[in-house]
Amino acid sequence: MIKVSQLTKKFGSHISLDNVSCTFEKNESIALMGANGAGKTTLIRSILGYYHPNSGEVLVNGLNPVKQRTQVLQNISFVPQLPPPIKLSLEELMQYISISAQVDTQLIMHYADEMKLDIKANIHKSFFKLSGGMKQKMLIAISLAKKSTIIIYDEPTANLDPKARDDFYRLLKQNEDEKVLLFVTHRLEEVKELVNRQIYMDLGKVVSDEKV
């Protein structure tokens, strides 16, 4: 599904990824861990096609995420650590997602309801003006409704209260088959029950990669 081969990415003289190689397959739920600056975010952004590598390559379902980015992103759901500053109302946002990514708006509303987010009561509110927790619930609902084969969450529970975290874990358990689930996290205990593989990065390298 995702193959990273001898990937190096530099920013000026700083090496953010140092000859990284790893493969992520279907039915794997991976915790990607490491201190700030370890290279986790750079690796994720390379998979999403944001960065051109200095050397090596990334293939997502056999496609280059830089050169064939539109095709690659059709099969990926990504929830960032910081919600984007979207000014659209929830109604407009769902319409945009429905048209651009062929996602069923009723399915978004279903998962939002499962996350205890009342979309109907907030339908005309700007996404930008929602609380951090409500934004996170909305993005999670969209990520699940898209039915992607690869789902990437960057610190997914940072803005969620304990009940919402339980709802999130329950929904992921129901939707993990035939997928790659990749969690970028500082808190292993929060995703420990969900993952079957743990990867630690440090100074741009993979220092540990274990099945659990």
Image: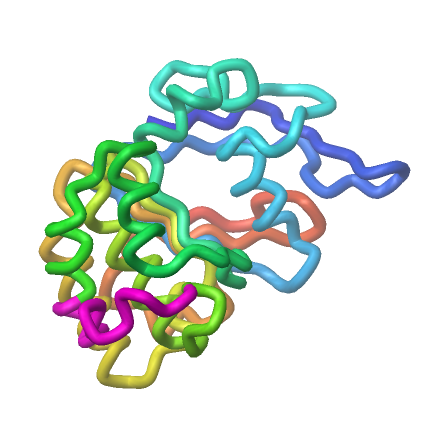
Quarter location, residue 42? top right
What segment carries the magenta color?
Answer: 113-126
Residue depicted at 42% across the width and 74% down the height:
130
Q: Let me know if residue 184 appears in the view.
A: no
Give the number of callouts: 0
Give the vertical position of 99 relative to 191 (above or below). Answer: above
Residue 97 forms part of the magenta stretch? no
Residue 116 forms part of the magenta stretch? yes
Quarter location, residue 139? bottom left
Residue depicted at 71% across the width and 50% down the height:
203
In this image, 117 relative to 185: left or right? left
The extreme right residue here reads: 13
Residue depicted at 47% across the width and 33% down the height:
22
Give the vertical position of 4 relative to 156 (above or below). Answer: above
In this image, 48 relative to 101: left or right? right
Image coordinates of residue 20 in percent, x first then y, are 60, 33
Q: Quadrant of the N terminus?
A: top left
In this image, 15 relative to 130: left or right? right
Q: Nearer the viewer, residue 72 or 44?
A: 72
Image coordinates of residue 192 in percent, x first then y, are 30, 67
Give the vertical position of 82 relative to 68 (above or below). Answer: below
Q: Nearer the viewer, residue 154 or 109?
A: 109
Q: Let me know if residue 119 appears in the view.
A: yes
The extreme front residue here reads: 124
Q: Quadrant of the C terminus?
A: bottom left
In this image, 109 relative to 186: left or right? left
Image coordinates of residue 26 in percent, x first then y, are 23, 34
Image coordinates of residue 159 in percent, x first then y, are 42, 76
Quarter location, residue 96? top left
Residue depicted at 28% across the width and 50% down the height:
94
The extreme bottom residue here reads: 162
